[in-house]
Image (cartoon, helix red, strand yellow):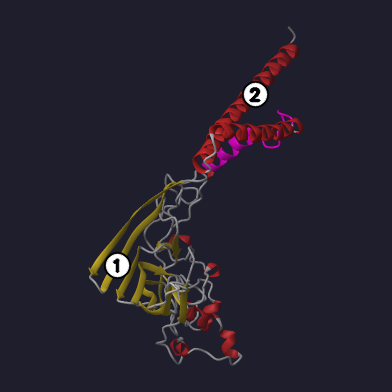
Amino acid sequence: MKPGKRNRKGLDMYQTREKIQSIILLLADLICFAVSYFGGGYLWLVGYRNVSVANMKIELMESFGIVMVVYMLVMLFSDIDNRFIDRSVFQELWAAIKANVGKTQSQGFELTINTTNIRNKDFEWTSDLTFSLYRDKWKERDPKWKPNAYDEYNGWMRYYSGYLSDGLVQVGETIDHMPGALPGQVKIKDIDGYVYESDGSIKVDKHGIPMKTGKPDGKLDDADKVIYGSADPGYLFGFNNTLRWKNFDLNVYFYGQFDKLSAGSYKKQWLSNNVNDLRRGYNQPTSISDLWSSSNPNGTLPGYFQTESAYGVGDYYYEKTWFIRCRNITLGYNIPIKTSKHILSNVRVYFDVNNPFTITPYTGLDPETDISSSESAPSQLQWAYPNVRTYSFGLDITF
């Protein structure tokens, strides 16, 4: 047999095998579809609609016939060997997803306690307490992962990172690893350097993470950056109390977050980043008195030269904080209704206060909404309006 005929025969056998595999997969799809269709239809018609078994068979067969006609028409106008969406496409897509997404690990717990503290003829007090703790970390990275010098193989999934700050540059101060730094700018620490191979390339560990010496090297680069901590709060809790005395009812709800790392207050960063507003004579908040200047060298906020810095602010604005917020207080009264015709069954008046107060050491506007980001780059920081306090009065009428 000539080589060309032998190759052609082998190709024909391969194509035949592919068609047989496609037909087998098609039959498997039809069987799975039929089992799911009739099983689900039986539960729906007999279990929920109380249709008799005889009528159920008729309804299922009629609708199944319509579905099969539509299916055959689709298959007729889309060749079985050239389907619009081939099974191999899904296989390749799934393989790509598995190859490009690492494995994660979520650990934590949630505790819920419901209590009836007091209950008698005229008075009742109940409480609901929830407490939760969750930690999301990487268990296994994507093989194509390209780590930064500060990354950790099993580190946080969401985190803040960047340089470490060391106060503000003062007049006459020279910083060798920050050439061109001006007074009033944030001073950045030089804490580390790379380990180099003999050919001058950066040495990496088994995960591809650049190795470091642990000693300053006289310059600022990614080797000096660190992970500040997780962007997720450490602990969350909620505490709800309901008190009833005769026709009065009172509900008070608290919630909070602990071990929370905030990336910085809008109020503070806005001052240093809006030098043009001062030049134009715009009104400024009273905290502008904390801005560094040659006449105020003890100022705690970076001066207006900070906008010219090539090194950023590092962790200068970061705060480790917590808060307990009283989310809602509602006081209500059920008005006794006495009527023989029973036109009204209940009338309740209530007064409601949302966000009456927050307990926190945070120095910004709002520890919950002041900053929302998982990155430390200022261009990626997102602020939101603080929670506002609202008052409302209502009337509930039940007929």
Relative side of 129 to 5, left or right: left
- Residue nearest the viewer, comparing 111 with 63: 63
Residue 127: assigned label: 1
Circle 1 Cα neighbour tier, 10 Å, few/some/many (<14 / 14–19 / ≥20): some
Residue 132 on image: x %, y %: 34, 60
Q: Is residue 392 above or below residue 117?
A: below
Q: Amino acid at mark 2?
A: Ile
Q: Residue at x 37, y 56 (%)?
A: 135
Q: Is residue 387 above or below residue 54?
A: below
> Is 371 within the magenta?
no
- Residue nearest the viewer, comparing 263 with 49: 49
Q: Residue at x 44, y 72 (%)?
A: 342
Q: Amino acid at mark 1?
A: Ser
Mark yes or no: residue 250 visible.
yes
Q: Is residue 300 above or below residue 156?
A: below
Circle 2 Cα neighbour tier, 10 Å, few/some/many (<14 / 14–19 / ≥20): some
- Reading the chain from its start, which is encountered first: label 1 or label 2? 2
Q: Quadrant of the N terminus?
A: top right
Q: Which residues are magenta?
A: 79-98
Question: Distance between the Cα atoms at labels 1 and 2?
Answer: 62 Å
Q: Residue at x 50, y 73 (%)?
A: 179
Residue 390 on image: x %, y %: 46, 81
Q: Secondary structure at mark 2?
A: helix
Residue 23: assigned label: 2
Query: Mark 1 or 2, which is nearer the eye?
Result: 1
Asked if labels 2 and 1 touch by Cβ distance under 8 angstroms, the answer is no
Residue 280 on image: x %, y %: 61, 90
Residue 187 on image: x %, y %: 44, 75
